[in-house]
Structures are given as C-alpha cells and as structure tokens.
Image: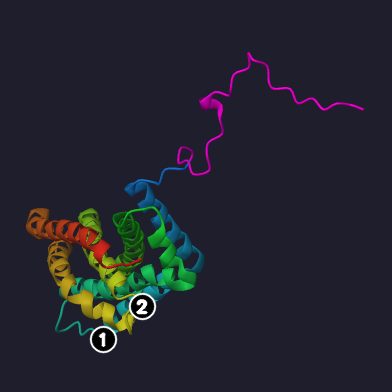
Amino acid sequence: MHSTDTSAPESGASPPDAATRAPRSGSREGAPRPPGVLAAALLIARKDLSIEYRTRSAFLAALAFALVSVVIFRFAWDQTTVTALDLAPGVLWVIFTFSGLLGLFRSFGVELAEGALDGLLGSPVSREAIFLGKFSANVLFVIAVQAVTVPAVVLFYNLSIGSAWLPLAGVTILASVGLVAVGTLFSAMALNTRMAELLLPVLTLPFFVPVVVPAAQATVALLGGRPIAEALPWIRVLLAFDLVFLFACTSVFRFTVEE
C-alpha cells in the first residue's frame, strides 16, 4: 500500500509575505477613483451631445421654429413705419429666447427613459458636475441654433454688420450663458411636475429679462454702427448677470434633484 505524504512544510519555509497576498474582496485599493467635477461634467456633456447628434430632434425643431419665425416677422413687417434696424434686434432676441426653450426641457427629459436619471443621480459624481455637464451641452446647443439664426436675420432684413460681427458673436455667447444657466436649473425643477412643458416657460421667462434686455440694447448699438464703447456698459451688465446666475444656479441645483 502507498502511504500518503502528510508531512508539514519544511521548517525553513516562511509564510507568504503580506505584500504578495491577494487583496481581499472588500478592499478598496484597486477600486477606480471617481472623476473630478470638470471631468465628470465633460463626460455628461459629451453624452448629451452624442444623443442629440444621433436624433437631432430638438435641434431641428428649434432651428425650424427660428427660421419660420424670421420669415413670418419679415413678411408681417411694414417698412414704412418701422425700419429694419429698429425691428431686427427685437426679432432676433424674441426668437433666441423661445427657440432655446425648445431644447432646454429635453436636457433632463431624455434622462427619464428607463430610469436613466436615477442612474445619473446615483453615480459617484457631484451634483455640481451634473449641472455643469448639462449646462455645457445646452450652451453649445443654443449657440448652434444662433449660428444659423443670426445670419438669417441679417439676410432677410438686409442688415450691414461690417466689423461688428465679432462683438455681436460675443454678446450672443454671453446671453447664451445666462439664459442656459437659468433654463437648465428650472428644467430640472419642472421635470417631475405635471405639464412640465408649460411650466418651464412660466418659470424661466421672468429670469430671462435681465439677460435679454442688456443683450438687445448692446445689439442695437452694434448693428447701428456705433462705437463698441457705447455697447460696453450693456455688455458689463450682461456679464454681471451671467456670473450671478451661473454661480447661483450651480449652488442651488443640488437641492432641486433627489435620488
């Protein structure tokens, strides 16, 4: 019969070193670190822009609304009573305000499908990162719509921009920042309410006024061929409201969403 070898290990053998032992299942040493605020915001913005690029539903709806509005205002305009220079800035910012609303609600509306919002809120990222990601995607969305709307207004109303195109682009971007900051916050607030599509304009439009008024006044000065120094006071007011709205909305956003 063969005897089984049950001898103990050699006396000189030492137990495995603690550093070479396999990590326990509950150890967090190998767990990936969550992304920072900016990195998470970029990921969320990229996700939203990818969804919109595939569907293009909100962008095409906002663009169609903007272009149809330009045409309607153009043919309803009596040239003998109001000049194009007086009418165009108002038309531009009315269209800008309402076309932006079409895309702002969809920013959080797409997260309702299949519980995506719960997954987003349960992810290891801060609420500020979620807001900044949504905000960044919405700003790019609004700027893309304006990149088509502004040339359409210039063409239909036969305006001469000249060297004012660069300051006008800056005013458009600054106004987009203020409007989108407020719109993104109220879009999250109105998400789980009844008739959210109707509630969003009611909430946001009063807060749009401090942004639209200086933007429109700066646009009037720039399209009228006046020196940019005349538009600078309005641009400073616009920049001040942008900073206030962006800081306030980012700080308050954490209280508007629940896991």
Along the horizontal axis of the image, is 4 left or right of 112?
right
Rendered image: mark on residue 65: 2
| Residue 19 forms part of the magenta stretch | yes
Choose top left, top right, bottom left or bottom right for residue 201: bottom left
| Element class at badge 1 | loop
Q: Quadrant of the N terminus?
A: top right
Residue 254, given in percent of the width and then of the height, sits at 26, 61
| Residue 47 forms part of the magenta stretch | no
Q: Which residue is mark 1?
A: 76
Residue 108, given in percent of the width and then of the height, sits at 37, 69
Residue 228, given in percent of the width and then of the height, sits at 12, 54
Please report contact status of discs 2 and 1: CB closer than 8 Å, yes or no: no
The earlier-in-sequence mark between 2 and 1 is 2
Observer-nearest residue: 97 or 197? Answer: 197
The rendered magenta stretch, by its main secondary structure, is classed as loop
Looking at the image, which residue is at 68% across and 16% down?
A: 10
Observer-nearest residue: 87 or 258? Answer: 258
Amino acid tagged 2: Phe
Observer-nearest residue: 41 or 116? Answer: 116
Amino acid tagged 1: Ala
Real-space Cα separation, disc 2 to disc 1, in angstroms: 16 Å
Rendered image: mark on residue 134: none
Looking at the image, which residue is at 17% across and 69% down?
A: 212
Looking at the image, which residue is at 23% across and 58% down?
A: 250
Along the horizontal axis of the image, is 133 left or right of 84?
right
| Element class at badge 2 | helix
Query: How busy is the neighbourhood of tag 1: few (under 14 within 10 Å), some, or many (20 plus)?
Result: few
Query: How busy is the neighbourhood of tag 2: few (under 14 within 10 Å), some, or many (20 plus)?
Result: some
Observer-nearest residue: 153 or 139? Answer: 139
Q: Which residues are magenta?
A: 1-30
